[in-house]
Image (tube, rainbow, N blue to C red):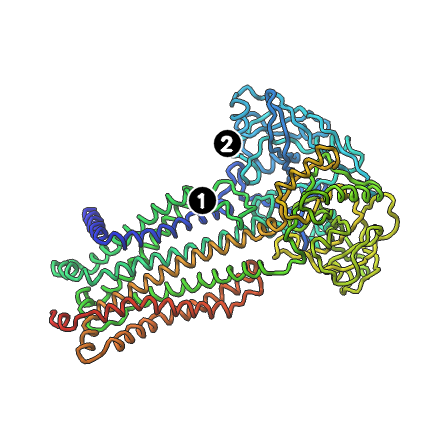
Amino acid sequence: MRGLLSDLRHAIKLYAVTPLSTALAIGALAAALAFVTVFASMWNDLALRPHPGLAGSERIITLQIETPELARGLAGETIHELDEQAVTLDGVVGIDDQPRSLRVDGEQLHARIELVSRNYFPVLRPRLHLGRALNEADHAGDAEQVAVVSYGFWRQHLGGRSDVLGETLEIADNPITFIAADGSSSTSSDQEVRVRIVGIMSRAMNATFGGAQGTDLWLALEPDVVRQRREGEARVFRSYSALGRLSPGSSAQAAADELNTRFADLAGQARLSGDQARWLVHPRITSNPQADEEVLGQVRLFLVASVLVAVVAAVNIGLFMLAQAPGRRREVNLRFALGASRRRIIRQLVTEAGVLVIGAAVLGLVASLWLSAMLQELAFLDGAGWREVNPLDWRVLLMLCAGVALLTAMAALAPAFGLRQTGIAHALRQVSARAGLAQRASGIAQIALAGLLGGAALGFAWQLAYLARADYGFEPAGIVVVSAEFNQSVFFGGSWEEVLARRTERRELLSALPRVEAVAFGVPAPAVPGFSMHLNASVPDQPEQRFSVNVISIDPAFPRLLGMRLLNGAMPQPDDPLGVLINERFAQEAWGHLDVLGEPVPLTSPMPSGVDGEARVVGVVADVAYSHPQEPIRPMVFTTAAFFSGVDSLLLKTSATPTEIRSAVEDLIDRGLIDIEIGDVVRLEDVWHELLAADRSRARLSITAALVAVFLAAFGFYGTQRYLVAAGRREYAIQAALGAGPRALRRVVLLRGLAMGLPGLVLGSLLAFIAIVWLRDGFLEQAVNPWVVSLLVVVGTTALILAACLGPARQALRMNPAQILREE
């Protein structure tokens, strides 16, 4: 212990002599470790840490029905059948997460409610703080509605009283619009429902699924469904998030195999699923498996990137320590002369490296507490169901400690190798300026990792530039979209004459607004959330083969206003409700070609009353991107006679701001001239720009990581070359004494630097090529060329090596040969 304390004091005194270089080395590694800690915390929250509120949550899986176009939850009947018959599952539960308003002591509150199926508590086993769980009797269709409330809601709104059990809450029922096949509709009442509190969830049970907003109440699903069906005139089509608990000895893969064999027909029969439907079994608890898997992939990617930057920083510390060796010649010689063993000197070097790495780790951990909140808001991590991203979780701290030990060993590697056969004194008095094995290995590692990270950054930057310049099938410039709120004001059905009259009246009013050049109607608009309808279509020659189609409500001005390109036929006419546009993907999916004018549309969609006949194709338009450009384009039908045209958005070609348009439309509403409840008012160009926010943040983060790695590699390579020049000063002095001029000495230093960096350059370009090929499978477009990226990495790495050698070359030129040769 006394020796360790002595080593620590010596290390601190040593670094106090060079405060700027020491701070730079610690700061670079601390920044890298902060990112490592945050991304490790995210990985822990998404994949490692069990759900704190559910017992045995590692055995719980998520179930969905997946098609090539979309994924959906399960119907109640499907959940019941799986629960009864699946061998690999101990049980399956359904969850409907809804926002509701409720009243507590006369105060109106907005709350999140989970409506859960009858076996939610027996299967998922949520932990309770007080009272009881929902039981079998609570799920009867005519049962009194009871609730289990969250710990947070109990403490904040119910005073944390133990006698709260048995009290009642008033919950506003969500009105539901029921749509029949002919387009007619009815809406359930919005009466308040009284529920009695029977239990309090534990503090750890914030919600079944992750997210910023926790759940406030858990209610039985079945009484709610019975009431909605009783109040509506049509069947309730509802799908639920589904979770299952694996039976003993079963795995997620075994469950997937069973569902896709024994229950394949259930997936195919699901509403709007189509023939290509299959079961998706996700090994974690999430409401959105696709988003969860995508976010987890992004987290893994940047965790690896930040680890690589930390490795570069640790190697840089080793080279920084090695660069101090010439100045420590007398100290080390004296310690050898006094009897210090090589092992004792190595322990001193490890201690010195440990001081830097541990100091950086502490700073990085502190910084990660602030950084974690900021990084969770990154656009490419949107959709993650975070529960608790905690850098102080014991799993994260264990990973950090293991990383610190490994990085300390790596940092001490380069200086320790100098003691392998001879003493440091001999190594420092050598005439040759050749790099040793440790120096070569460190230089190769730094340059190769910098090339790898630089190649990935170039790939993401290329991707961003490609997406920004791609053709999306429409022109968003100058268009403001006013979307209608989808609630009680929804208007379904109506006659064709009413649809035409409503559009004509609104067009006249909106066209008269200041700076409005043109008006169109439709829903949904590209990139703007709105009411959407998905239907199944059949291939005409193969009626048994179905595919999912998006139905878009438009007026004839909609495609013209958006600048949609007509590939065949003509635009729809105002007096022809049966003439529809289809996109290129629909034509290829149904007929395999674009020559489809006059063909009947192979799907049944409800239409307004007064429209009789079969819809036919009058035109084919180029595919329009309605979501992120990387998302596959879906088959689409654009019809002027959709039964849901009452929720059409207003599309205005205008130079006015969204705020000005909202004010003008609200004025028309207040004057009773337009009957619409406004949702969002956005500039289409801004919304489309926001779709690329994830790509921008991903590119910025990868470029930042690459720049840090490149800077550290350049700094480390510079330190190595400077050390080699200092260690071989006798050789350079002899060459100068024998007549070598400045250019010759500079050339020697540059050529030796290039020779030392060449293996790293080759390896870095190869790693960059492999990285781009791998990233093109899920992260990058195929347009990103790995050969071009590798070539750019070669050019950039060569420039980095030459730049790092210029300073040491000048150092060699400034040496005094006579003075050096007089030294012993």
Which quarter of the figure is the C terminus placed in? bottom left
Residue 89 picture location, percent across and down: 62, 44
Q: Is residue 83 above or below residue 146?
A: below
For residue 153, which quarter of the picture?
A: top right
In this figure, which residue is indicated by the disc labeled 2?
203
User: Mark 2 and 1 residues: CB-CB less than 8 Å, in contact?
Assistant: no
Say which element carries label 2: loop
Q: Nearer the viewer, residue 657 or 260?
A: 657
Measure the C-alpha gap from mark 2 to mark 1: 23 Å
Q: Which residue is located at x 53 percent, y 44 percent?
A: 58
Counting other residues with Cα less than 10 Å from the Cα at mark 1, is it few (<14), some (14-19), or many (20 or more)? many
Q: Is residue 81 visible to the viewer in this orientation of the structure?
A: no
Q: Amino acid at mark 2?
A: Arg
Task: Describe the element under mark 1 as helix, strand or loop.
Answer: helix
* Circle 1: residue type: Ser
Q: Is residue 339 above or below residue 62?
A: below
Q: Residue 60: where, in percent of width, then height?
A: 57, 43
Mark carried by residue 372: 1
